Image (cartoon, helix red, strand yellow):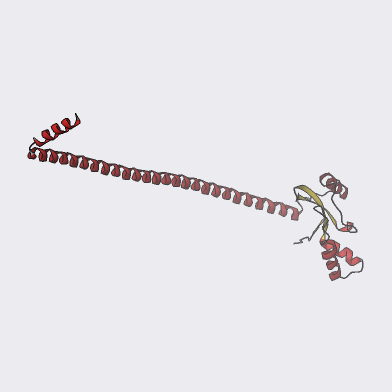
């Protein structure tokens, strides 16, 4: 059965003219060539599309960067203006403070503005209220000036304040020379730190 079919197929093929076979093959080759060209064109267009997409991505990144830089520059300019405004306000405040201080000092020198003073008892009471553990310098009561308030450690505090030169005179009255009294002050008084509430010693200025 199979041999009969094969024989008939060979007889049919043998009956086709050679020219017709060549023409059919050529037509098939041309069709394949056209398909190949269309495929090549399609691949080229895909490559162009990818290249354009990359260009668009780059352009998008550049525009975003420009926008970010523009926003940053605008913010920097705002901060510069704000700093300039604060500096101007600080200069005005310093000038006003200087004028007020000069006026007060002038009034105090002329006697028109009396100095505000307090008794020793009042100062000691104030020290107890603000800094109950405030310390005093033994034997230097005659050099006691009052209290100095400010920030000590982590909070507001007050410490006893003494006149440095008066302390030196007290030691001189005990038989020391001036140099010995100053050396004693530097080593045994100023050098005796006993905590944040250690007394302070003020060198006064007399214009």
Residue 54 figure quarter: top left
Left or right: 161, with 11 as reference point: right
User: In the image, residue 202 lies at what x, y percent?
Assistant: 79, 59
In this rendering, the count of numbered labels is 0
User: In the image, residue 195 lies at what x, y percent?
Assistant: 81, 54
On screen, residue 25 above or below 134: above
Left or right: 143, with 51 as reference point: right
Q: Residue at x 7, y 37 (%)?
A: 17
The C terminus - image quarter: bottom right
Q: Residue at x 83, y 46 (%)?
A: 126
Nearest the eye: 133 or 126: 133
Nearest the eye: 18 or 182: 18
Nearest the eye: 31 or 89: 31
Left or right: 158, with 51 as reference point: right
On screen, residue 206 above or below 151: below
Left or right: 14, with 120 as reference point: left
User: In the image, residue 197 lies at what x, y percent?
Assistant: 81, 52
The N terminus - image quarter: top left
User: In the image, residue 15 lies at what x, y percent?
Assistant: 8, 35
Q: Residue at x 34, y 42 (%)?
A: 53
Question: Seen from this angle, which residue lies furthest right?
Answer: 174
């Amino acid at each position: 059965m199979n041999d009969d079919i094969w024989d008939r197929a060979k007889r049919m093929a043998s009956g086709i003219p050679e020219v017709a076979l060549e023409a059919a093959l050529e037509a098939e080759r041309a069709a394949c060539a056209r398909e190949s060209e269309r495929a090549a064109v399609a691949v080229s267009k895909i490559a162009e599309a990818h290249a354009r997409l990359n260009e668009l991505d780059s352009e998008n990144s550049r525009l975003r960067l420009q926008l970010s830089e523009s926003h940053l520059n605008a913010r920097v300019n705002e901060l510069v203006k704000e700093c300039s405004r604060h500096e101007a306000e600080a200069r005005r405040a310093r000038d006003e403070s200087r004028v007020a201080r000069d006026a007060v000092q002038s009034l105090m020198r002329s006697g028109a503005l009396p100095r505000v003073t307090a008794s020793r008892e009042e100062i000691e009471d104030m020290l107890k209220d603000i800094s109950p553990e405030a310390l005093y310098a033994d034997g230097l009561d005659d050099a006691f000036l009052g209290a100095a308030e400010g920030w000590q450690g982590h909070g507001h505090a007050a410490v006893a304040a003494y006149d440095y030169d008066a302390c030196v005179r007290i030691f001189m009255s005990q038989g020391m020379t001036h140099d010995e009294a100053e050396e004693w002050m530097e080593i045994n008084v100023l050098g005796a730190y006993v905590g944040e509430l250690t007394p302070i010693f003020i060198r006064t200025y007399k214009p």
